Structures are given as structure tokens and as C-alpha cells.
Image: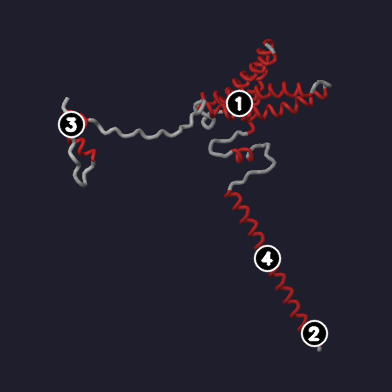
Amino acid sequence: MKPVVLAKPEEGKDVNQVVAATAPVSQRQSQEHLPNQASPAPRQNEKRELLPPELMEIVTPSLKVGATFGTLGLFTGAAAGIIRSAPPALFSVVMGGQMFALGSSYYASRMVALRAFGGENEIRPADKVKASTVAGGVAGMVGGVLRGPKNIVPGIICFSVFGGAGQLLANAINWKPSSESTTEGFLKSKWSPVTFLPDEEYQKILKEKLLRVEVEIAIVDDNIKELRTAEEQSKKQQEDHK
């Protein structure tokens, strides 16, 4: 192997340039043909969710509803335990857990059913009844599982009926034409204590009231004129007598 003698670098040249110039031709060609290897960009810490976003949109509100019902069950169970002279803490925990399971399962299954029918904003009232009935059946099944296998079928039947009947009542209360809002639909219903007035009718009523006020003002002006005329005539008659 022949020794390689490196030339002394000239002024203004880098040592690496001199070494590269004295390297063998094959090595220099292989270095020229190599692509520029850019340093990989550092990856940002991406936040990974445990569940898909579509599933989180169902799970999160369902847990909130279940927590609300569970809290209500805690207080109700404590009150029931005190009335029955039983341990309030035990009754509170049991009823709170059951209410949490019923509320969360009902809300989650109802949201899934509504999405299956096309979404809550575009769904028909009849489809809402179907979704609530199915959700009630699921909640009844969950409650039956918690209370024992014998209660599964009665729970499904009872909660399905309650869910469908409750949705029918809600549809009857919130019924409205497609072009009206919920408030307008309620005000136009026979159960409303007040009457809904469109803008045109309200303006017409205001104009009638304004016309009445103008007529009353004109009558008052006429009365004032008559009183002044009568006063002037009485003054003249007194002067004539003098």
C-alpha cells in the first residue's frame, strides 16, 4: 500500500477541501453521486386519543348525563335508606350506580340510533320515537342485568314503552312547522298562555292605538278652545255690564 502524501494547504483553502482533492478518484465519484442526506425533522409530540373522535362525541356526553343521573341517584338512595331504616350509604351507592348505568346507556344508545336514522337535525319525529324506544330497551336491559336475569325482559319492555311514550309527548309539545322556530310553535299551540303576533299584526295594533291617541288629543284641544271662548265671552259680558 502506497503512502499518501498530503500537500500543504494553501492560504484561504480549507483542510477538508485539500483532503477531498487528494482522495482517490473512485472515492470522490462515489461521494459526488451520493444524495444529500438531510437531517430528519424532529417529530412533534402528537396527542393521541384513546378513542376515535366519532366515538368520543358519543361517550363524553353520555358520561356527563350518566354522572348527572348518578348524582341524583346518590341523594335519592340516601333518602330511601333513611326512610326504610337501612344503611343510607349502601342505598346511596347502589342507586347511584344504577342511575348512572341507566342514564349513560340510554343517552349513548339514543345518539347511536339518531345517527343511524340520519342525524338529530334532519330526522323525522317518527324516527325520534323509534330511537327513543330502542334506547329505552337498551337501558332496560342494562338495568335488568344489574338487578338480576329475571328482570331483563320486563326491564326492556317497560323502558321501551316509557322511552317511546316520553318521546311522543316531547314531539307533541315541541311540534312546529318546518319554517317556524320552537318558541313560535309553542306560542301558537293551544297550551300557550299568550298569543303569538306576527310583526305585521303588531304594527297594525300600534297604528290603531296611535290613531286613538291622536283623536283623543284633538278632542282635548277642542274642549280647551271652547273653554277659552266661553271665558272670553264671560269677560266681555262683565265689561258690558260695567
Is residue 118 rendered to the left or right of residue 173? left
Mark 1 or 3, which is nearer the eye?
3
Give SS at disc 2: helix
Q: Earlier in the sequence, mark 4 or mark 1?
A: 1
Is residue 143 rendered to the left or right of residue 239? left
What residue does disc 3 label? 4
Around disc 1, counting alpha carbons within 10 Å, would you say few (fewer than 14), some (14 to 19), or many (20 or more)? Answer: many
Q: Earlier in the sequence, mark 2 or mark 1?
A: 1
Whole-angstrom CA distance, mark 2 to mark 3, is 148 Å
Residue 197 in the image: above or below residue 174:
below
Whole-angstrom CA distance, mark 4 to mark 2, is 32 Å
Look at the numbered discs 2 and 1 and tell me whether their residues touch, using CB distance below 8 Å: no
Look at the numbered discs 3 and 4 and tell me whether their residues touch, using CB distance below 8 Å: no
Residue 207 in the image: above or below residue 85:
below
Q: Earlier in the sequence, mark 4 or mark 2?
A: 4
What residue does disc 4 label? 217
What residue does disc 2 label? 238
Amino acid under disc 2: Gln
Mark 4 or 1, which is nearer the eye?
1
Front position in the image: 220 or 49: 49
Image colouring: secondary structure
Q: Residue 15: which quarter of the image?
A: top left
Q: Which mark is residue 107?
A: 1
Mark 4 or 2, which is nearer the eye?
4
Whole-angstrom CA distance, mark 3 to mark 4, is 121 Å
Q: Earlier in the sequence, mark 2 or mark 3?
A: 3
Amino acid under disc 4: Ile
Amino acid under disc 3: Val
Mark 2 or 3, which is nearer the eye?
3
Mark 2 or 1, which is nearer the eye?
1
Q: Earlier in the sequence, mark 1 or mark 3?
A: 3
Q: Residue at x 54, y 26 (%)?
A: 114
